[in-house]
Amino acid sequence: MSVDRGRLKVTFSTVILDRDGVVNHDSEAFIKSPAEWQPLPGSLEAIARLKHTGLRVVIASNQSGLGRGLFDYDDLFAIHDKMARQLGELGIQLDGVFFCPHTTEDQCRCRKPRPGLLEDILGRWNLRPSDCVMIGDSSRDIEAAQALGVHAIGVRSGKPIDPARSCWTAVPVFDDLSAAVDCLLSEAALHG
């Protein structure tokens, strides 16, 4: 699918989404249980629209609450099962959920803004960075995408965006995932 972004023509097959603040409501206290996981309005339908066009859709999420002992793997998998059930009700499923369980102190390669999660995604499907678009709500998401040359899109539905940070220069920003997907798909229809 091709999208014309002014001077940049973006051709992509895969959309990588951050989870908290993009797909579901975020919390400073972390999302620790299925009861706390609540989708943002229109986000699941936006994922369905992407899937119905034949795009691959994957989650790439920092989950340091695991490393902090705030929840365990069973809790995280139950949260993802709830998300999968709700997406299943729309007739679709994600192509993958990738997460980093580490804290900042672990200095791992997979915790965004480091690009390890995105490298894993690219490797899984033998993708080039130009095959992907990353949609995130934080500088960490944008920096991870930019580190590999993955196209980045921001949303305001999660963490506050600091326009003074250089990573946001020339990054399109939308109110939420639904608006970002509307733009991606409408521009793809016009330029595809």
Image (cartoon, helix red, strand yellow):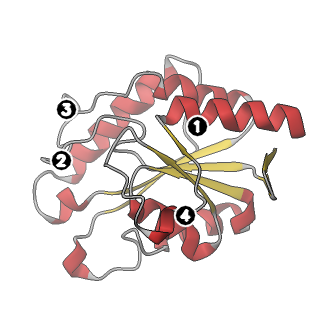
Work out whether residue 186 or residue 130 is closer to the camera in this orientation and state it: 186
Q: Residues within 10 Å of mark 3 (few under 14, many from 20)?
A: some
Q: Helix, strand, or loop for circle 1?
A: helix
Give the image quarter of residue 140: bottom left
Nearer to us of marks 2 and 1 is 1
Residue labelled with disc 4? 169
Residue labelled with disc 3? 36
Mark 4 and mark 1: span between their CA atoms? 17 Å
Residue labelled with disc 2? 30
Q: Residue at x 18, y 47 (%)?
A: 30
- Labelled disc at residue 180: 1
Nearer to us of marks 3 and 4 is 4
Q: Is residue 129 left or right of residue 161?
A: right
x, y percentage for residue 80?
36, 39
Extreme-front residue of the structure: 164
Between discs 4 and 1, the one toward the N terminus: 4
Q: Helix, strand, or loop for circle 3?
A: loop
Question: What kind of residue is marked 2?
Answer: Phe
Question: What kind of residue is marked 3?
Answer: Glu
